[in-house]
């Protein structure tokens, strides 16, 4: 990735139907520099307008859900946080 592009990571912990996400674009986003990780109740989302969406594996397992998104471990999530230029928790 070109380092002139800022790498942004969003951690989404709100379930679908809860208050909106004013910091997230509402249109489909395919930029490689934006990643979303669904955590806590956020793992209940089945569709988001981003090309890079992940779930936290332990949260998916604890809620006994299946998700259309690939899972990441806590260790991978920590790495993603440290690699990001900006982290927003929603």
Image: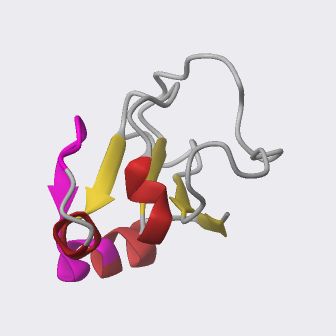
* Residue 75 image position (x, y, % from top left): 20, 82
Q: Does residue 71 appear left or right of residue 38 in this picture?
A: left
Is-magenta flag for residue 82?
no
The quarter in which the C terminus is drawn is: bottom right
In this rendering, the answer to whether 70 lies above or below 26 is below
Pick the residue in front: 60 or 30: 60
In this rendering, the answer to whether 21 lies above or below 14 is above
Q: Does residue 6 appear left or right of residue 52 in this picture?
A: right
In this rendering, the answer to whether 90 lies above or below 30 is below
Q: How many marks?
A: 0
Residue furthest top in the image: 28
Q: Residue at x 17, y 73 (%)?
A: 73
Residue furthest right in the image: 22
The part of the chain drawn in magenta is: 66-77
The quarter in which the N terminus is drawn is: top left
* Residue 84 image position (x, y, % from top left): 48, 65
The part of the image, by quadrant, that contains residue 62 is: bottom left
The part of the image, by quadrant, that contains residue 47 is: top left
Pick the residue in front: 11 or 84: 11
Q: Residue at x 48, y 58 (%)?
A: 42
In this rendering, the answer to whether 48 lies above or below 41 is above
What colour scheme has been applied to the protein in the rendered image? secondary structure
* Residue 82 image position (x, y, % from top left): 42, 78
The part of the image, by quadrant, that contains residue 37 is: bottom left
Q: Residue at x 49, y 27 (%)?
A: 31
Q: Residue at x 75, y 47 (%)?
A: 21
């Amino acid at each position: 990735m070109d380092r002139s592009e800022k790498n942004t990571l969003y951690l989404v912990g709100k379930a679908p139907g809860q208050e909106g996400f004013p910091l997230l674009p509402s249109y489909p986003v395919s930029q490689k520099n934006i990643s979303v990780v669904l955590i806590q109740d956020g793992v209940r989302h089945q569709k988001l307008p981003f090309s890079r969406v992940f779930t936290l594996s332990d949260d998916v397992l604890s809620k006994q859900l299946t998700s259309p998104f690939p899972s990441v471990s806590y260790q991978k999530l920590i790495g993603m946080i440290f690699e990001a230029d900006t982290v927003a928790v929603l």
